[in-house]
Image (cartoon, grey):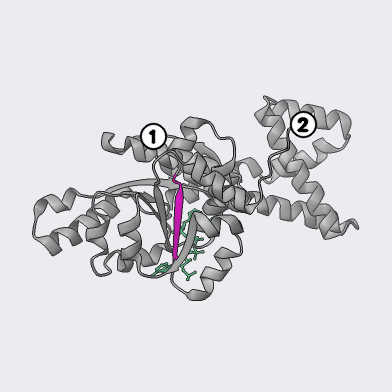
């Protein structure tokens, strides 16, 4: 007897979510679901149905609640998420952050950095956050700083000193490429022992939007600079090369496609083990005038300039 192929339309997917979720429902709440939060949802929701390794699937949340400030933002987020997920596992809400936190098993804090203090001071949100793992993606903040801030509010509210230590924050720093699921995310790896499970969950979440790097805390700043700031640096190099090519008659689009394709390929070659010297020698053989171009870059001390740019960014 011929077997009929299984169909996975929207209705079946809904069913599939229920069938595959023998594991406990775990709710991820994203407070401040803007560019970054939406990119994470876009990466993680399709992973629900895919053939993930069982270990990773067990670590991922199964329900998602996104919180924003303005009603119009909800439509923008909804339009970017799979419709079948909106009918079942994901929902978008306006404000009421406290209600969100009460529902959460894991919280992703993704407000604009300047807003976080006032939002955490919102009425009774702090009490709701107590004991819940918080993943911080705010650039420029330390987990202990947020824990201390929450602890001070909780202590003030309850007058109980033990409340001061009731908060658990880890930090992860994805980069702008999360939007195209190729983030280089830096995840702090040496948090207090009781946060090991949260780290594992964060690792699973961010590996849905790219590659996760796990340096120890001492190197967090240099790693986040190398992954977070360099897209802006590389874009400058592309910009100059494209303008140079346009001056010789290429269209901007053609030149951009060629330069970006070549940059991606260069990264692949370096990853596969080619050294700077190998690349230099081979390009010089095949394209006769490469050394002249290199000489211009060397005269301008480009290598030093890159190092200085990195140094200035890390040192702030
Ligand atoms: N974007 C990146 O590439 C990137 C990379 C690494 C780290 N980060 C960090 O990620 C965080 C978010 O960045 P982003 O680019 O995603 O910013 P964003 O697009 O401006 O998103 C911030 C979100 O916070 C929401 N929000 C503000 N007040 C709120 C409130 N009272 N209640 C609920 N939601 C509220 C905003 O809602 P409305 O939309 O309704 O205004 C918006 O959706 C920042 O701290 C940034 O440092 C971003």
Residue 249 in magenta stretch: no
Report x, y in % for residue 225: 50, 46
Report x, y in % for residue 174: 50, 48
Q: Is residue 261 above or below residue 274?
A: below
Tell me which secondary structure the magenta stretch mostly adopts. strand
- Seen from the viewer's position, the closer of residues 147 and 251 is 147
Q: Which residue is mark 2?
A: 2
**Residue at the extreme front of the image, as rendered:** 1
Q: Nearer the viewer, mark 2 or mark 1?
A: 2
- Seen from the viewer's position, the closer of residues 87 and 145 is 87
Asked whether the viewer can see residue 314, the reply is yes
Regarding mark 2 in the picture, which secondary structure is present there? loop
Numbered range of the magenta stretch: 61-67
Task: Rate crowding at label 1 as few (under 14), some (14 to 19) or many (20 or more) other CA atoms within 10 Å.
Answer: some
* Residue 156 relative to residue 304: left or right: left
Q: Is residue 111 above or below residue 183?
A: below
Report x, y in % for residue 210: 57, 42
**Residue at the extreme bottom of the image, as rendered:** 71
In the picture, the quarter occupied by the N terminus is top right
Instruction: Tell me what residue is drawn at x 39 percent, y 42 percent.
Output: 24
Report x, y in % for residue 75: 56, 70
The quarter of the picture where residue 67 lies is bottom left
Regarding mark 1 in the picture, which secondary structure is present there? loop
Q: Is residue 271 above or below residue 128?
A: above
Instruction: Tell me what residue is drawn at x 72 percent, y 30 percent.
Output: 269
Asked whether the viewer can see residue 310, the reply is no
Task: Rate crowding at label 2 as few (under 14), some (14 to 19) or many (20 or more) other CA atoms within 10 Å.
Answer: few
Picture disc at residue 216: 1
Q: CA distance from mark 2 to mark 1?
A: 56 Å
């Amino acid at each position: 007897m011929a077997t009929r192929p299984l169909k996975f339309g929207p209705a079946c997917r809904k069913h599939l979510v229920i069938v595959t979720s023998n594991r406990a429902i775990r709710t991820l709440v994203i407070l401040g679901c803007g560019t970054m939060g939406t990119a994470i949802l876009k990466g993680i929701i399709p992973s629900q149905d895919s053939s993930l390794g069982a270990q990773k699937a067990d670590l991922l949340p199964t329900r998602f609640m996104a919180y924003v400030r303005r009603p119009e933002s909800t439509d923008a987020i909804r339009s970017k998420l799979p419709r079948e997920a909106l009918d079942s596992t994901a929902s978008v809400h306006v404000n009421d952050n406290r209600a969100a936190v009460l529902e959460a098993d894991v919280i992703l804090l993704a407000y604009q950095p300047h807003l976080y203090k006032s939002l955490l001071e919102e009425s009774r949100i702090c009490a709701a956050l107590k004991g819940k793992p918080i993943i911080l993606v705010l650039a420029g903040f330390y987990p202990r700083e947020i824990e201390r801030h929450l602890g001070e509010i909780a202590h003030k509210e309850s007058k109980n000193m033990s409340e001061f230590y009731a908060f658990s924050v880890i930090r992860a720093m994805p980069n702008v490429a999360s939007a195209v699921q190729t983030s280089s995310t830096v995840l702090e790896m040496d948090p207090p022992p009781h946060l090991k499970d949260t780290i594992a969950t964060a690792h699973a979440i961010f590996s849905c939007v790219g590659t996760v790097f796990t340096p120890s805390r001492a190197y967090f700043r240099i790693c986040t600079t190398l992954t977070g700031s360099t897209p802006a640096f590389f874009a400058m190099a592309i910009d100059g090369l494209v303008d140079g090519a346009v001056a010789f008659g290429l269209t901007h689009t053609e030149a951009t496609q060629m330069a970006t394709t070549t940059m991606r390929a260069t990264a692949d070659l370096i990853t596969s083990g080619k050294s700077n010297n190998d690349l230099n020698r081979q390009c010089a053989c095949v394209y006769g005038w490469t050394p002249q171009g290199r000489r211009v870059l060397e005269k301008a001390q480009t290598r030093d300039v890159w190092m200085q740019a990195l140094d200035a960014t890390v040192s702030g």
